[in-house]
Amino acid sequence: MKTRKLGSEGYEVSAIGLGCVNFSGFYGSTNKSETFACLDAARDCGITFLDTAEAYGKGLSEELIGEYQKDRGCKFVIATKGGVIIGGKRGDTDNSESGLRQALEGSLKRLKISSVELYYIHRRDWSIPIEEVVETLVKFKNEGKIGGFGFSEISPASLRRANAVHPVMAVQNEYSLWTRYPDLGVVQACRELGVTFVPFSPLGRGMFAERFPDPSAFEENDFRKNTPRFLEPNFSANCKQIARFREFASSRGWNTSSVALAWVLDQGEHLIPIPGTRTAGHLSEWVRATEIQFTDEDRDEIKRLLPVGFAHGDRYSDAQVVGIERYC
C-alpha cells in the first residue's frame, strides 16, 4: 500500500488507516475472533496505522489491539484519544494534566505498550485554554509517552492557537462525500500548517458500502439508530442520491466504497482516512482505493452526482453533537 506522513516530521504510515471504534460494538455486536481476523486482514493488506480511543467500549478496543499485537508479535503505528470522562454524562470532559495523565496511562496499559505514536484530545474541555492543554501534551511527549499529539473535532481557529504553542501532528474530524464541513477551513488550515488531516467515517457510516445498511436491523447500541440521516424520510432520499453514484462507480469498473475513499484521498496528500469495519470481508472492499486514479472528468461527474450539501438530515442528533466544536 502507498504511504503518507503523519505530521510534517512524523511517522510514515499506510495512506489508509483502520478506525477501530467498531471493535467496541459501536455499530453492533462483535467478538474477539472477528476482531483478530479483521486486524489480520489489515496487516496483510499493508495497513500500518490504527485509530482507537479510551472511550471506545470503555477501553475494549484498546484492550483487543493490545492483545492482538502481543499474540501476533506485530506492531502497528497507533493513535488513541483521551479527555472524555469515562462513565460520565455524554459531553463530560477533563483536559487537566492529572486527568489526561491518568487517561494516557490507562490507554498504554490496555495497549500493552510504553508509548503511543499519536495521542488526541478526544473532546475539548472548555474550562481549560487550549494553550494549557498543549503544554500538558508537550510534557507527555518530552517524557517519551507519546510521539506527537492532535485534536478531534476542533475548529480551524483552535488548531491555529494550539499549533502556535507547539506543532500539532494531526486533526481528526468526520469527512466524506456526504460530510463536507471541514472544507470550510479545517482541511485548508491543516495543509497550511503541515498538520495531517485524518477523516473518520470516510464511507458515511456504511452508506458508501456495497450494500445500503438496513436501519430496521440496527441493534439498540448502534450509533446510527438515532442519527437523522438514517431516519425517514432522510434515509430513503439519501439512498436514492447515492444509488446514482454507485452506477457511476460500476461504469468505471470500481466498487462504491473504493471510489468514495479514493475521493477522500484525492483531496490532498495530507489526508489519511481511517475507515472502520468489524470484518475482513468489508475491509477487502475498500482497501485498494489507493490504486484508483481519477481523471478531471471523473471529478466533475462525482461533483455533479453528489454536490456539496446533498445529504438529507444532520450528521448528528442534538443529543449526539455534544462536545463537538462548531465553527460555521
Image (cartoon, rainbow, N blue to C red):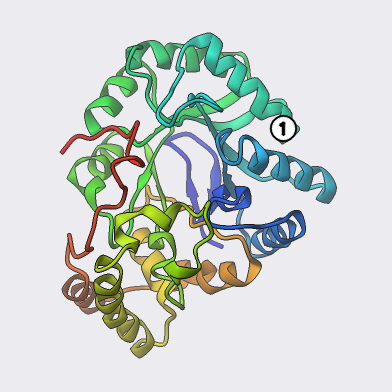
Q: Position of residue 202 (x, y in %)?
A: 40, 58
Q: Residue at x 29, y 78 (%)?
A: 245
Q: Position of residue 144 (x, y in %)?
A: 63, 19
Q: Residue at x 33, y 52 (%)?
A: 175
Q: Position of residue 25 (x, y in %)?
A: 59, 51
In this picture, residue 297 sits left or right of residue 83: left
Label 1 Cα crowd, 10 Å radius (few <14 / some 14-19 / many 20+) = some
- Can you see residue 17? no
- Disc 1 marks a residue whose amino acid type is Arg
- Label 1: element kind: helix
Viewer-proximal residue among 75 and 56: 56
Q: Is residue 94 above or below residue 297?
A: above
Q: Residue at x 72, y 32 (%)?
A: 110
Kindly indicate the quadrant of the structure image that contains residue 173.
top left
Q: Is residue 271 above or below residue 262?
A: above
Instruction: Identify residue for label 1.
Output: 110
Q: Is residue 165 above or below residue 204?
A: above
- Specify the farthest residue to the bottom: 251
Viewer-proximal residue among 58 and 77: 58
